[in-house]
Structure formats: C-alpha cells, structure tokens
Image (cartoon, rainbow, N blue to C red):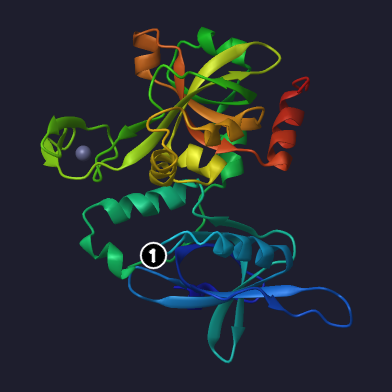
Amino acid sequence: MLKKEANDVFLVDVIGECTAMSDKIDTSTNGTPNYKVMFELEDLNKNTISGTVWGKYAEQMSEYKKKGIQGRPIIILQFAKIKISRDQVSLCNSLFATKIFINEDISELNDYKESITDGDASRSLGITHLSSQNSHSIGDEFMKMSEHKQLDEIPDTNKECFCATVATIVGFEKDTNWYYNSCKSCNKKVDYEGGGRYWCIKCDSHVKSAPPRYKVTVSVEDDSGSASFVMFDREVFQAIQISTMDLKDKLLKDGKGDSFPEELEMLLERKCLFRIQISKYNLDQDWDKFTVVRLSDDEDLIKRFLDVNEVAQVR
Ligand SMILES: [Zn+2]
C-alpha cells in the first residue's frame, strides 16, 4: 500500500513492531555532530519496511534501546517521510515535523496492542502490523475532541463526556492498592479463587496467571480547585517508564512487599494535560474519581492548550 501512495513529499503516520534497531551511529562531518539510527518495522503480513532517523530522533530511539526493555517495541512514526530509491521504499524523519512514539500512549498503539491480545497465540513470534494511519493526532484528542474544563467545573458536569484539563499531580490516595491483578484477555480485575487460580467475571472463565496492572489514584490541582483522577496501566507506565511487574518485583526484592512504591513519587509535582472520562457511573453514583484516558506532559501541547483556554497559569 505504501508503494502505491508514496511520493517523495508525502508525510505518513506509520505503526509497526520494531524487529531491528541499530545502535546510534556517529555520522558527524567536519566537526558538525550528527547521529543516525537504522531500524526495521514489520506488519501483520510480515511485510517489512526499513527506516533511518537522524539527530534528535536518533537520540530518542537509542535512549529507548539503552533501557534494555524486553520484547519488540511498537513504534509510531508520525509525519514520517517516505523515501524511494531504486524502487526501494524506506522511511526517514522529516526535519522538524516528525514525532516518534515508542510503546507510548497513542490510541492506534493501544488498539494495536489490543488486537494482539485478541487471542493471537503467535505473539511470541513477533507478528506485527504496519499501516498508514491518517486518523486524528493525540493533540486533537485534547484540543478538539474533549471539552476543556478547569477542575472546579468537573463536578457541575451532568452529561457523559470526555474533558481535557491541565493539572498538577500533588498526592496519592494510598488506601487502595496501587495495582490490581488483571485478566490477560480483557485487562479487567480478576478475583483470586485459591490454588493459584483467578476468576475473570467479564470473560466468565478461570485465569491461570494474572499480571499486575497499575491503578493509581492521584490528587490533582489547578488554580480553580482539586480532583481525584484514576490512572491505569498505560498512563502510569508512560509517565514513569517502569512496568507494573518490574516495580512489584523490585519491591519484593527490596523486602518492601506490597508497600506503596516510592518510584511512583516521580509523578508528584508533574503538570500534565489529562483527558478524563466523565462516565455514566460517575454521574449515576455521584462518584468523584475520574478515569484518565489520555495523558501528555508535552510542554508545547500544554502551552497550546492553556493559550487556547486563556487559563491563568500559576504552577
Ligand atoms: Zn477477562
């Protein structure tokens, strides 16, 4: 599909599983520092496309690689450039417009991950997707597809909706656990049945292993007031870059068991753009903890958001 549509000025958004990535290669010339990283993405049909990114994009990829996270990361290149030479199609970054998301919180990326967990047993073989996406950007999710609200306006909302708000994380609610045991198929909470087995109500079946997933309730503040937001696995991982399992293992190793992990304190004093859901449950039950469905700490995006809303900025 790429081959048919591609031309040399066409910017595309591409998602795929990264099957190969080079180290950072020094391409500095005449004292001008530069680097590149080469990589390969693979799709569901085992089509592959190679690419090269330069400069800060190379830094970003190599930083991710250095973390040594297991498994093939899913990568989105937004506004990537397509290059054709000798009938070979490859990707590279545009000079400024490209954004790279590696295992981050993007709806396409989450959909992709979900489609993998939909009973795909060949996951371990690294079957992947690669598709050209022209759907909305994450920026749009905050800027256009959400109602903009300050925290004091949220309790007055009387219909289901998504709202976007800029707030600072100031504390945690520690009387509920910071993770839950999840069903691998549907990610919902499972109940321990004893004998190493769990029960998933949604899937109506026994579950043998129940990987922990984040569920962290944070207190947030803006100039207008405060609120409680519930952050789930994607968002917490995005913010602290440690998986729930790794963090739980670390606590065990440190002899801290199920105590509240200090690694989560990294979230404190962070000003973020939140997209939250005001659900039927929130309205019907007068429940004042709101689920975060998207998170960004991108300074440009926050600034753009605040400028649009003319919200006074104190923090
Ligand atoms: Zn389930």
Residue 313 quadrant? top right
In this orientation, which residue lies closer to the viewer: 252 or 36?
252
Q: Residue at x 55, y 59 (%)?
A: 67
Q: Residue at x 38, y 33 (%)?
A: 257
Q: Residue at x 62, y 78 (%)?
A: 83
Give above or below for 1 relative to 208.
Answer: below
Q: Pick out the residue farthest to the front.
A: 255
Any part of residue 201 in sight: no
Query: Circle 1 sits in a helix, a strand or a loop, which is it?
Result: loop
Dot 1 crowding, Cα within 10 Å, few <14, some 14–19, many 20+: many
Give above or below for 83 relative to 294.
Answer: below
Image coordinates for residue 224, horizontal then vertical, percent: 68, 11
Give above or below for 150 relative to 31.
Answer: above
Image coordinates for residue 11, horizontal then vertical, percent: 62, 65
Image coordinates for residue 270, horizontal then vertical, percent: 65, 31
- Which quadrant of the frame does ligand 1 lie within? top left
Question: Disc 1 residue type?
Answer: His
Q: Pick out the residue farthest to the right.
A: 30
- Give the quadrant of the N terminus: bottom left
Any part of residue 52 in sight: yes
The residue at which mark 1 appears reads as 129
Image coordinates for residue 27, horizontal then vertical, percent: 75, 80
Q: Residue at x 72, y 63 (%)?
A: 56
- Give the quadrant of the C terminus: top right
Q: Is mark 1 within 8 Å of ligand 1?
A: no
Name the side, left or right, on which 87 lies relative to 130: right
Name the side, left or right, on which 80 lies relative to 258: right
